[in-house]
Amino acid sequence: MSHYVESEQGVRIYVEDIGAGTPVIFLHGWPLNHKMFEYQFMELPRLGYRCIGIDLRGFGKSDASWDGYNYCSLADDVKAVVDRLGITGATLVGFSLGGAVAARYMARHSGHGISKLVLAGAAAPSFVQREDFVLGTPPDKVDDMILQAYADRPALAAQFGKMLTAAKPSSGMASWLQSLAFEASAVGTYKALESLRTEDLREDLPLIRVPTAIFHGVQDEICPFELGEEMHRLIPGSTLHRFEDSGHAMLFDERQLFSERLTAFLADTLIVPEPIEVTPEQTPIL
C-alpha cells in the first residue's frame, strides 16, 4: 500500500507501507529512495513486521520543494508520516543520509514513536571534516560533488554508485542503483549535498535514548568506519557492529549478514560480544 502524507510545509511525502505487525521505518541514502530496501521489504513482512519506506523530499516519488533539505525539515517530514500513520513502538532504520536524518529526528522529536534505532553507514556525526573534527570527507571533495551535481548529475550518480560497495557491483546492480538515483530531483540531489556539507550532529547523538545498533562497513570509502566508532562513543548504550567485507552499503555487500543482524535486533536476540578493555587511545568496538 502506498500513501502520500503532506508535511507541515505542504510537501507531499511518499510512503510505501507493506505488511502488518511491529513497524520498521526505513530512511534511504543520498541520492536513492525507499526501493534500495527492497530485499528487506521482501523478507521482514514474512516474519511479522510492517515495512514503511519513506522517500525523503526531493527523492523518489516525494515532492521536490525548492527549500527544506536541512536535517530539521527532513526530520519534520518523518514526524508528519509517523503522526499521520499513528506509528508507535517502531524501529527506525537510517542508511547514510537517512541515518543522519534519523539521528536528528531522535534528538529533535525526542524519539517520538520510535523504540529502537539502527544507523547503517550513517553520515554522522559529521559527513565532512571540520577544524575540530578530523574524521569524514574533506569539504573540498563535497564541494566538487555539489558542482558536479549541477553540471553533470548522471556522471555523479554513476561515480557514486561504484563507491557504494566494496566488491565491484554487477552491471545489473550498477544500472539499478543509477536508475534509483535518476528518480531523484535535481534540486533534491543538489541541496541534500549542501546539507551533508554543513550539518553537524555531534550535539544530537548524546540525546538518543533508545537501544541503538550501529552497522558500519569496515571498508567504507564514503563514511569511513571511524565515523561509526565516533557514533558509538557519543550515543549512550549503543553497540557497534562491524561488517568486515563491506563498503558503504553493507546491505548489498553482506546482505545475508545484514538481514540476520537486523532481524535479531528487531527480535531482541542480537548477540553483542563482551566489551573489550579500553585504553585512552581506543574507542570500544562491540
Image (cartoon, rainbow, N blue to C red):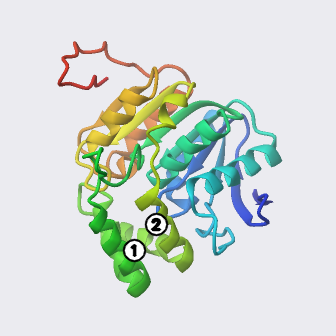
Q: Extreme bottom residue here?
A: 151
For disc 2, the marked residue is 194
Residue under the point 46% across and 66% down: 194
- CA separation in Å, label 1 and label 2: 7 Å
Q: Are marks 1 and 2 in contact (CB under 8 Å)?
A: yes
For disc 1, the marked residue is 146
Residue under the point 65% across and 70% down: 61
Closer to the camera in the image, 36 or 114: 114
Query: Is residue 75 toward the left or the right of residue 6 in the image?
Result: left
Residue under the point 47% across and 49% down: 95
Q: Is residue 112 above or below residue 137?
A: above
Within 10 Å of disc 2 (Cα), the crowding (few <14, some 14-19, many 20+) is some
Q: Earlier in the sequence, mark 1 or mark 2?
A: 1
On the question of residue 70 being in view, the answer is: yes
From the top left corner, tell me how far across and down residue 276 is, in percent.
Answer: 24, 15
| Disc 2, SS | helix
Q: Image quarter for residue 228?
A: top left
From the top left corner, tell me how far across and down residue 45 is, in percent.
Answer: 64, 41
Kindly identify the amino acid type of the residue bearing the numbered disc 1. Answer: Ile
Q: Is residue 119 above or below residue 157?
A: above
Q: Is residue 147 above or below residue 167?
A: below
Within 10 Å of disc 1 (Cα), the crowding (few <14, some 14-19, many 20+) is many
| Disc 1, SS | helix
Residue under the point 40% across and 82% down: 154
Quadrant where the image shows the C terminus: top left
Quadrant where the image shows the N terminus: bottom right
Closer to the camera in the image, 39 or 92: 92
